[in-house]
Image (spheres, helix red, strand yellow):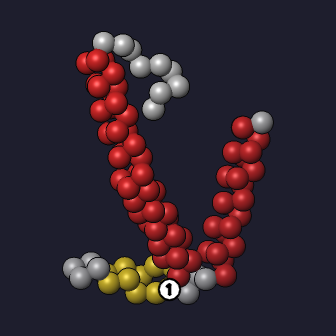
Amino acid sequence: MYRIGFIILALAAIALGLIVGTLNSEPVAVDLLWIQFQWPLGLVMLIALVCGFLVGIALVWITAVVPVRVRMRKLRAQAEHSGHPPEPGDA
């Protein structure tokens, strides 16, 4: 079931990329101070989308996942120091 869902999602992403690429094929100038590129608008849009997605994932990781892991590590250390091991349901 997981494999079928992944294949469907991958095909949808490829189709979306092809549609965006073909509908926005005009070249645009991308100037990064010391480097200049002439890329199709669709490619620039997809790169911006992926970069935004990666920045969002990084922010969620830093603000939500890391503090929870630090707290869990502290609680486990306290439990080991007090003499009884933590139970599987303890967080």
Residue shown at 53%/25% (left/top)? 89
Using the rendered view, name the quadrant where residue 59 is placed: bottom left
- Where's the C terminus, which quadrant? top left
x then y, percent, for residue 37: 37, 79
Residue shown at 24%/82% (left/top)? 33
Is 21 on the left or on the right of 57, as rendered? right
Of residues 64 and 5, the one drawn nearer to the viewer in this rendering: 64
Using the rendered view, name the quadrant where residue 69 is placed: top left
Residue shown at 46%/87% (left/top)? 28
x then y, percent, for residue 78: 29, 25
Q: How many marks?
A: 1
x then y, percent, for residue 25: 59, 82
- Where's the N terminus, which quadrant? top right
Task: Find disc 1 in the rendering and name its residue.
Answer: 27
Against 79, residue 1 (above or below) is below
Of residues 5 and 13, the one drawn nearer to the viewer in this rendering: 5
Would residue 58 be visible to someone looking at this image?
Answer: no
Callout 1 amino acid: Pro
Residue shown at 69%/45% (left/top)? 6
Is 88 on the left or on the right of 12, as rendered? left
Of residues 69 and 49, the one drawn nearer to the viewer in this rendering: 69
